[in-house]
């Protein structure tokens, strides 16, 4: 198999798909599974390069959310089971005490212009600061954001020690309004390069935004009565019998574990981002930017958890989260993806700040429900039910038998395709 395909990008989508099918000897079912027809095909073709088709994610809606006094339905696109259930469960836990209260810094992104080969970095930094107003004016001349009430609001400069020596880094603080802002900020960074080169006497190198969006933080908090934390069990399992105060204290202990151990914190934060990314994917926002920002922020004082759990005066569990949230309600891929726009309609937020508030609340809800399950019945029971249903489907169980076959495999602690086939025969 030769991966060299000259001019692959110049072919149309169906030609690219048939070329790949030939090279990899794909059967007709595989080709059909990848193919994207009609509007979906047109849309995805324009979003990336070398597109051959599309892949479908489930689009779910998490329920029970109250954010700053308003009910919100949260669209989530994620292929992992239990993520949406956990978000809805966490929101339900917070709901009886009024839901989530949030706060955001505002939509401020940072753009970086790096200058190398500067003879006098410390003085060069000062020369940049002396010309801050001029630099901001050149950035704002680009007009992309100013017409919407945003624009460059501040110019700062740093001298950074790198393995390649000292480099001067100019930061633009840009109010990107309702955009995620990457393209807009990058345009500004490129525009100011000549002034920065002149001020520093150095060679301008990189001109690009930073995803460590620590001036665009979103925060959410909620409180939960310990009684609400008691596992009442469901049809498939017994309640665990652990009382609410114990569950509350174990959640605080589990958070403390993450605060003390980066191995645990990585998974703690991965759980938060399960939900945050799912809303970003559903609305065609850049989930990689959110990921980069969240983990870089979590690592600012040694890697730690993005959430905190405490016990309040009245014995309630007090839950909070703070993380950088770089999302837009305008521009980006959302502007051209009809399903992404429709997901924004489901969400119904006004502007990027309100969107950031919901993302923070969602991350907290997910983490709260995951920790509650982890310290109590464990997360595998919920996961296993869905896993067993998938195994039953793979084994050819008809739709009417999937739940029964799965339930019997879970009860017998034997979740295998061959066991599923036996059960299908027995029950069919
Ligand atoms: P964009 O390029 O679509 O710009 C936003 C547009 O919306 C601007 O033209 C602006 O004039 C317009 N607009 C209309 N109403 C507005 C309002 N109320 N507030 C603000 N702008 C308004 O999108 P963007 O947000 O600049 O960039 C986002 C895209 O950049 C994403 O697709 C992302 O994947 C991509 N990107 C990300 C990175 C990164 O994160 N490192 C780097 C490069 C590109």
Image: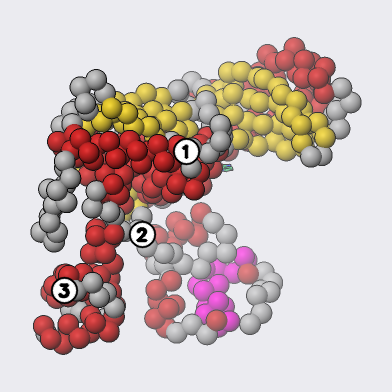
Query: Is residue 293 among the parts visible in the rendering?
Result: no
The one of 422 and 330 positioned closer to us in this rendering = 422
In percent of width and height, residue 15 lies at: 54, 74
Eye-nearest disc, 2 or 1: 1
- For the N terminus, which image quadrant? bottom right
The quadrant where residue 97 appears: top left
The segment highlighted magenta reads 9-23
The first of marks 3 and 2 along the sequence is: 2
Q: Earlier in the sequence, mark 1 or mark 3?
A: 1
The residue under label 3 is: 408
Q: Which residue: 86% across, 32% down?
A: 117
Q: Are marks 3 and 2 in contact (CB under 8 Å)?
A: no
Compared to residue 360, the image places residue 313 above or below, namely: above
Which SS class for mark 1? helix
Which residue is found at the position 18% from the left and 78% from the top? 398
Earlier sequence position, callout 2 versus callout 1:
2
Structural distance between the alpha carbons of marks 1 and 3: 40 Å
On whether residue 19 falls in the magenta region, the answer is: yes
Does the segment drawn in magenta span residue 320?
Answer: no
Tell me the crowding category of disc 3: few under 14, some 14 to 19, or many 20 or more residues within 10 angstroms, Cα based: some
> Could you say where residue 242 lies in the image, as x and y percent from the top left?
17, 45
Disc 2 and disc 1: Cα gap in Å?
Answer: 30 Å
Checking the image for residue 260, the label placed there is 1
Label 3: which secondary element: helix
Measured as percent of width and height from the top left, residue 287 is found at 47, 46
> What is the number of callouts on the image?
3
Q: Which residue is mark 2?
A: 79
Tell whether 53 sits left or right of 319: right
């Amino acid at each position: 198999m030769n991966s060299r395909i000259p001019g692959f990008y110049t072919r149309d989508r169906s030609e690219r798909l048939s070329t790949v099918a030939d090279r990899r000897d794909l059967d007709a079912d595989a080709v059909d599974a990848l193919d994207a027809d009609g509007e979906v095909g047109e849309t995805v073709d324009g979003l990336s390069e070398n597109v051959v088709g599309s892949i479908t994610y489930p689009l779910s809606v998490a329920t029970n959310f109250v954010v700053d006094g308003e009910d919100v339905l949260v669209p989530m696109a994620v292929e992992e089971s239990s993520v949406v259930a956990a978000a809805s469960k966490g929101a339900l836990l917070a709901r009886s005490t009024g839901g989530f209260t949030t706060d955001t810094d505002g939509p401020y992104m940072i753009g970086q212009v790096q200058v190398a080969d500067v003879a006098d970095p410390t003085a060069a930094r000062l020369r940049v600061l002396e010309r801050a107003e001029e630099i901001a004016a050149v950035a704002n001349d680009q007009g992309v954001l100013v017409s919407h009430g945003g624009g460059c609001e501040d110019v700062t400069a740093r001298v950074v020690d790198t393995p390649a020596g000292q480099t001067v880094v100019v930061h633009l603080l840009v109010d990107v309004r309702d955009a995620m802002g990457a393209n807009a900020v990058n345009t500004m960074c490129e525009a100011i390069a000549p002034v920065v080169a002149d001020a520093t006497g150095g060679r301008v190198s990189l001109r690009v935004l930073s995803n460590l969006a620590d001036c665009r933080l979103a925060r959410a908090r909620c409180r939960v009565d310990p009684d609400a934390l008691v596992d009442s069990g469901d049809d498939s399992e017994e309640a665990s019998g652990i009382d609410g105060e114990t569950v509350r204290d174990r959640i605080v202990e589990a958070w403390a574990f993450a605060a003390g151990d980066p191995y645990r914190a990585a998974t703690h934060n991965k759980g938060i981002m399960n939900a945050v990314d799912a809303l970003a994917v559903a609305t065609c926002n850049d989930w990689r930017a959110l990921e980069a920002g969240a983990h870089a922020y979590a690592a600012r004082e040694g890697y730690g958890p993005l959430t905190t759990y405490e016990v309040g005066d009245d014995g309630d569990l007090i839950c909070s989260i703070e993380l950088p949230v770089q999302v837009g309600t305008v521009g980006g891929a959302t502007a051209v993806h009809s399903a992404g726009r429709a997901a924004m309609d489901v969400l119904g937020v006004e502007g990027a700040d309100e969107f950031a508030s919901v993302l923070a609340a969602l991350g907290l809800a997910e983490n709260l429900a995951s920790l509650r399950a982890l310290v109590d019945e464990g997360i595998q029971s919920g996961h296993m039910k869905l896993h067993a249903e998938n195994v039953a489907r793979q084994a050819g169980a008809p739709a009417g038998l999937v739940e029964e076959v799965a339930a019997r495999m879970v009860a017998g602690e034997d979740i295998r395709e061959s066991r599923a086939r036996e059960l299908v025969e027995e029950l069919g």
